[in-house]
Amino acid sequence: NAQIDKIFEEISKIIQDNNSQPRTRFYTALLMVKLSEGKVSNYTIDKIGQSNQILNVLFTHAQVDRSKAFTEKGFKVFGSTFGDSTEVQTIGNNYVNLILEALVFWNKKYGQDKDNAAR
């Protein structure tokens, strides 16, 4: 579990760092989701559930610019730091979609688990 702790610590840093490249943040979020689905899923979900900082960032990113259509959210999620290229928009859209899917998955799989309240 010490290795998972270290991985999760690095994941948290990257997701929360506004200077992390969009592609890096997307693949880091994907790694976090994959860890929550694998053999260490319960431990990973516990780590995510115990980290208010990462949850707040994920919720904020998932709700970015709610008034816009899904295909228009990509520019806002990473701010103006990385420009407004089609690539940044596409990565942003995929990132928001990944987070939304993860939050729904986590809620369905762990949200109603009264024996595991932290999840």
Image (cartoon, rainbow, N blue to C red):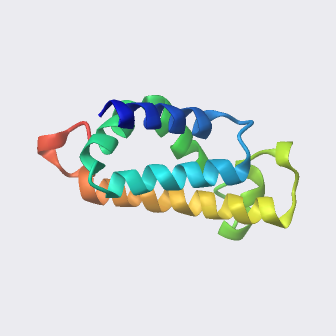
Quadrant showing the N terminus:
top left
Number of numbered discs on residues: 0
* Quadrant in the rendering for residue 107: bottom left
Q: Residue at x 25, y 51 (%)?
A: 110
Q: Where does the image place residue 111, in percent across and percent down from the top left?
A: 26, 50
Q: Residue at x 29, y 50 (%)?
A: 41
Specify whether residue 99 is in view. yes
Residue 70 placement, left or right of 104: right
The percent coordinates of residue 25 (x first, y second) are 63, 48
Horizontal placement of 87 versus 106: left or right? Answer: right
Q: Is residue 49 left or right of residue 55?
A: left
On the image, which quarter does residue 85 sit in? bottom right
Residue 112, given in percent of the width and then of the height, sits at 20, 52
Near-viewer residue (43 or 88): 43
Residue 4 falls in which quadrant of the image?
Answer: top left
**Residue 63 visible from this viewpoint:** no
At 51% across and 56% down in the image, what residue appears? 30
**In the displayed structure image, the side of residue 43 where residue 99 appears, left or right:** right
Q: Is residue 106 above or below residue 6?
A: below
What is the residue that sits farthest to the front in this orientation? 3
15 in relation to 26, above or below: above
Residue at the far left: name it: 115
* Residue under the image location 60 percent in, 47 percent down: 61
Residue 78, compared with residue 94, is above or below; it is above
Q: Position of residue 27 (x, y in %)?
A: 59, 54
User: Where the C terminus falls, by quadrant?
Assistant: top left
